Amino acid sequence: MEFLDLPPLVSARGTVRLPGSKSISNRVLLLAALADGVSEVRDLLASDDTARMLEALQMLGVKVEALGGDAWRVHGCGGDFPVREADLFLGNAGTAFRPLTAALALADGTYRLSGVPRMHERPIGDLVDGLRQLGADIAYLGSEGYPPLQLKPARIRPGGVVRVRGDVSSQFLTGLLMALPLTGVETTVEVVGELISKPYIEITLATMARFGVAVARDGWQRFVVPAGSRYRSPGTIHVEGDASSASYFLALGAIGGGPVRVEGVGRDSIQGDVRFAEALAQMGAIIEMGDNWIECRSPEGGLKGIALDCNHIPDAAMTLATTALFADGPTTLANIASWRVKETDRIAAMAKELRKLGAEVEEGADFIRVLPPPSSLLSPPEGIDTYDDHRIAMCFSLAAFGTALRINDPKCVAKTFPDYFERLASVTEAVPVIAIDGPSASGKGTVAARVAAALGWHYLDSGALYRLTALAARRAGVAWDDEPAVAAIAAKLDVVFAGESIRLAGEEVGQAIRTEEMGIGASQVAALPAVRAALLFRQRLFRRAPGLVGDGRDMGSVIFPDAGTKVFLTASAEVRAERRHKQLIEKGIAATMQPILQDLRERDERDSKRSVAPLRQTADAELLDTSALTIEEAVAKVLAWAKAKV
Ligand code: DC
C-alpha cells in the first residue's frame, strides 16, 4: 500500500490560491456543452472528477479544446449531442454521473453509464423515478436503484409537475433542473421530503442563470423551469475557487496560529461551503473576509467544541470533525445523513479513524460527536485509512499537528485537489530536525546527543533500533538473515527509551546492545529492506516539538529528507579505530587495534554498498571531518550550521 508520512506540524501561516470548485467546474462544463455557442471556461479544476466529465462530453461528440493552464474552450451543441450511442465510464464522480444521467435521459440516444464499484453503491433511484415521470426509458443494469444505467430513446412528455425526493442527495434535483431546459416546455419540480445540502442547489441555479436560464422558485419546495428556456454561452466564464477545499486551510489557520489566507472564494461566493468560516468562528477562530478571500487565525484561548446543524455545509463539515481534535470539549455535527452515501460511508469512516487517534466518538444515523483525547493524539502505526475518499485524506492531514502521521493511499486527493499535500507543506512549519549521518565510530552519536542537549531537543539514536532488532532476533532464536522473521521482530519491538536507559520487553539492555557482536548483527539486519521498512515510521515518530537530532546512516537521505540541517560526520578509519579501541579499554574490555580496524572497514563496506538506504553524503549535507577535531569543536560546528538555517 502506498502511504505518505506527514511530519508533525507546529504552525501554519501563508496564502493559498485555491483550485477551481469541483461542483462549479462540472456544472459549467455540462451547461457549456448543452448551450448554443462557444464558451471559454477559465480556472477549471484539474482533477479526476472533471477529467471524467471532459472525457464523457468528448465521447458524446462535444468539441472541447485545452487552451493551456486551466482554460478550456467548449463548443456547445445546443442541447443535441452529436453521438447517439455511447458507453460512458464516470469513475466515482457524482457531479458527472447524476446530471449526465438526466441530460442524456431526455436526449435521443442509447447510452450506458457506469462507474467504479463504489459509484454502483451510491443510490440514484430518486433521480430515475423523477425522469421516468417525464417518460424517460431508463433501465438498471445491476441492482435496482443503483448504477450502472442504460438509457434509451423515449417519447419525452415534459410539462406538468415532476416530483423528486430531496432528502438523500441534492444532486438528483440538480440533475433534473439542469436537464429540463432541454425540453423547452414549462415544467415544475416539486421536492418531496426535506431538501438537504441546499447550498448546492444555489450553485446550480446561479450557474444556470449564467447560461441564460432563470428558474423561479418557491422556497425550497417548488422550482419552475420556464417555457422557452435555452442555454446560451456566456462567452467567458470563470470558475470560483473550491470552498470545500478552502476548509482545510482555514482550519490550519485555526489550529496552527495563522493567519492562513485562501484566495478564490470570499464574501461574493455562490458556494454555501464558505459558511464553514462561520462554524470556525463559532469554535473561536478569528475570521476576516474580502470579496475574494478569507483569512483565519487561532484564538488566544484555544478552540472550543460546538454543536452544529451541518445541512448547509455538508462537505466542509467533515473538516470540523478533525478540527474538533484540537478543541476544548466535545463537538457534535448533526444533520449529516448524506455523508453515508458519498465516496464512502463518511460517518463510519470518520468515526473509525478518529478513534485510532485516541478520540472518543459517538455516531448515529445522521450525526457524529467527537471528544478529543485527554492528552496528545495517538499516531497509529498502521496509518490513517482514506477509503478512496479525497476528503477523508485531506481532513486527517490536520491531525499532523503535534504528531507524525501516516496517511494511507494519499493519492485519492486527486479527485479534487491533486497537489494538496504540496500546498499543505507550503503553509505549514514542521518540527525541525538536525540529521547527522556517518560511518561507525565517527563520533556522531556523542556529537548528536550533545547537540540535542544543548538545544533541549529530542535525540534519536537510530543505530540503537537496529542493534535492538539484532538483539531481539538473537533472543528469539531467529537468524539475522531471515528477512521476514527479523522484520516481524522489528515491527513489534517493545522498547522504551528513557535518557541513558533502554528497555527491551521491560529489561534494561543499554549495555547489551553496545557489544561488537550486536554492532555486527545490526549492520546485517540493517541491510534487509523489510527491516528498514518496519522501522521507518517508528523513527519518524521520534520527531516531536521542539525539535529532533537524529544520528545514523540515512537520517538525511531517507528518514528525514526534509531536515533543515544535514551533516555528514566522518573521520579516517584509523582515527575511528583508535577511538573505538580507547572506548573498549576504558570499559575494561580487552581489545587490539588490528581486528577493530578490519571490522570497521568491513562494516563501512556493508553500510555503504547495500542496496537500500546506503550510507552516503547527500548533496545538501555539510561535511564534517572530525579526524582532527575535539568533540566540543564538532558540536560547536553543528550548532553553528543549525543556527544559520533558522
Ligand atoms: O550507529 P551504530 O553503530 O549504532 O549502528 C549499528 C548498525 O546499524 C550500523 O552498522 C548500520 C546500521 N544503521 C543503519 O543502517 N542505519 C541507521 N540509520 C543507523 C544504523
Image: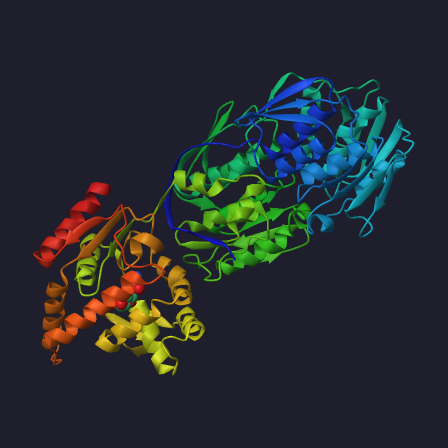
Residue 499 shows up from this direction: no
Residue at the image point whose x is 80% and y is 44% from the top:
149
Ligand 1 image-quadrant field: bottom left
Q: Is residue 243 above or below residue 500?
A: above
Q: Position of residue 362 (x, y in %)?
A: 59, 57
Q: Could you say which is closer to the camera, residue 194 or residue 387?
A: 387
Q: Could you say which is closer to the camera, residue 545 or residue 638?
A: 638
Q: Could you say which is closer to the camera, residue 333 or residue 522?
A: 522
| Count of numbered tags | 0
Left or right: residue 101 compared with residue 534: right
Quarter of the C terminus within the rendering: top left
Left or right: residue 457 compared with residue 242: left
Q: Could you say which is closer to the camera, residue 633 or residue 323?
A: 633
Residue 430 shows up from this direction: yes
Residue at the image point whose x is 22% and y is 56% from the top:
452
- Please name the colour scheme applied to the rendered image: rainbow
Q: Position of residue 273 (x, y in %)?
A: 59, 35
Left or right: residue 28 compared with residue 480: right
Q: Is residue 641 above or below residue 160?
A: below
Q: Position of residue 186 (x, y in %)?
A: 85, 22
Quadrant in which residue 352 is drawn: bottom right
Residue at the image point whose x is 60% and y is 40% from the top:
48
Left or right: residue 332 compared with residue 217: left
Q: Position of residue 581 (x, y in %)?
A: 11, 72
